[in-house]
Image: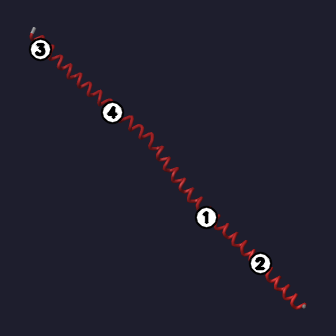
Amino acid sequence: LSAAKEEVALAQRKLKKNKHALWRENECSVSLRAELAAAQAVVKVEPVLAKAGEMEAMAAAHARELSSVLARLDAAELRVVAMEAREASNAVDARAVAAQTLADAAGAGQ
């Protein structure tokens, strides 16, 4: 009877030890599954991040190009304004010459 009790006690200890080992293995499995899920998420996100980087670079290139176009447009507008100012100045000069000619003609006619 005592040998049977010892055998039962030994079997219970082994069962408890095995149960604890299974519990640890399950915890490791849960942890590994979580790590796997995190790694899979990173693998799925990396191409998206790469594409976002490419798009950002293209946007920066387009912004530089647009800035250059706008600068050329501003320069062209300034040239047009300068030409208009020269034309207006020439017209004023022409009127002044005409007025002086009329004044001279009027003075000579008196």
**Element under disc 3:** helix
Q: Are marks 2 and 4 in contact (CB under 8 Å)?
A: no
**Element under disc 4:** helix
Which residue lies at the image location 86% right of the left edge and 90% below the top edge?
A: 107
Q: Which residue is mark 2?
A: 92
Which residue lies at the image location 22% right of the left edge and 22% below the top edge?
A: 18
Quadrant where the image shows the N terminus: top left
Which residue lies at the image location 26% right of the left edge and 28% below the top edge?
A: 24
Q: Which residue is mark 3?
A: 6
Q: Which mark is residue 32?
A: 4
Where is residue 65 drawn, in percent x and y?
58, 59
Where is residue 108 drawn, in percent x and y?
88, 91
Q: Are marks 3 and 4 in contact (CB under 8 Å)?
A: no
**Which is more N-terminal, label 4 or label 3?**
3
Where is residue 73 drawn, in percent x and y?
65, 64
Q: Which mark is residue 83?
A: none
Between marks 1 and 2 in the image, the one whose residue lies nearer the viewer: 2
Kindly indicate the quadrant of the structure image that contains residue 27.
Answer: top left
Circle 2 crowding by C-alpha within 10 Å: few under 14, some 14–19, many from 20: few
Q: Amino acid at mark 1?
A: Ala
Q: Amino acid at mark 3?
A: Glu
Q: Which residue is mark 1?
A: 71
